[in-house]
Image (cartoon, rainbow, N blue to C red):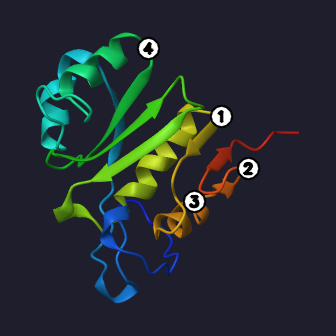
């Protein structure tokens, strides 16, 4: 039994977004969400498909430069038992805190994506997403508290005000 209990939302979506159909789910894997610094980022970014030096695609060099300039922050989801990094998210500081989220294929369906989002919610008062229209990700993020705002496919989450 896991030390953290995560409620079953009953969402049916594809594994790209960290969830599988209700019958296909594996046990949730509790993870720790940690901020990474530019000096340790290169190896982690390569693990998640970033290329060494490319133009027009996400490259390790460009990502590290954005981190050093304060334009973007990266966070990892780490299995506390093994230390393995199983998920990655980034937040663009200059683009309305736009979130990008990725979970390694072997760990999808284990509630890692929602834990990464929860970790971001603890650090930011507002998060946004782009291009969720027409994807199963829209329902995934909606169930995590994001709502449609303005432009089609743009979603936001805002920390509730404490009264």
Give the residue at mark 3. 144
At mark 4, the secondary structure is loop
Tell me how far mark 1 sits from mark 4, CA to CA. Answer: 17 Å
Q: What's the mark number on residue 150? A: 2
Sequence order check, earlier mark of 3 and 4: 4
Relative to residue 38, is residue 131 drawn left or right?
A: right
The residue drawn where x is 41% and y is 48% is 116
Q: What's the mark number on residue 125? A: 1
Q: Position of residue 80 (x, y in %)?
A: 24, 46
- Up/down of 122 relative to 11, above or below: above
- Up/down of 138 relative to 86, above or below: below
Q: Position of residue 134 (x, y in %)?
A: 51, 69
Relative to residue 77, is residue 161 drawn left or right?
A: right
Tell me how far mark 3 sits from mark 4, CA to CA. Answer: 27 Å
| Front label number (2 vs 4) | 2
Sequence order check, earlier mark of 3 and 1: 1
Crowd class of label 1 (few under 14; some 14 to 19; many from 20; radius 10 Å): few
At mark 3, the secondary structure is loop
Q: Position of residue 138 (x, y in %)?
A: 54, 64
Tell me how far mark 2 sits from mark 4, CA to CA. Answer: 27 Å
Tell me how far mark 3 sits from mark 1, CA to CA. Answer: 14 Å
Sequence order check, earlier mark of 2 and 4: 4
Sequence order check, earlier mark of 1 and 4: 4
């Amino acid at each position: 039994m896991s030390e953290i209990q995560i409620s079953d939302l009953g969402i049916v979506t594809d594994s790209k977004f960290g969830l599988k159909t209700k019958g296909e789910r594996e046990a949730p894997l509790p993870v720790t969400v940690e901020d990474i610094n530019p000096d340790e980022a290169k190896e982690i970014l390569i693990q998640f498909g970033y290329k060494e030096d490319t133009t027009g695609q996400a490259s390790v060099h460009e990502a590290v430069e954005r981190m050093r300039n304060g334009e973007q922050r990266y966070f990892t989801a780490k299995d506390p038992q093994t230390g393995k990094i199983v998920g990655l998210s980034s937040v663009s500081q200059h683009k309305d805190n736009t979130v990008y989220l990725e979970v390694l294929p072997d760990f999808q369906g284990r509630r890692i994506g929602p834990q990464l989002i929860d970790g971001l919610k603890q650090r930011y008062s507002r998060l946004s997403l782009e291009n969720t229209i027409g994807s199963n990700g829209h329902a995934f993020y909606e169930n995590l508290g994001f709502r449609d705002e303005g432009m089609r496919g743009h979603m936001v989450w805002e920390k509730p005000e404490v009264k």
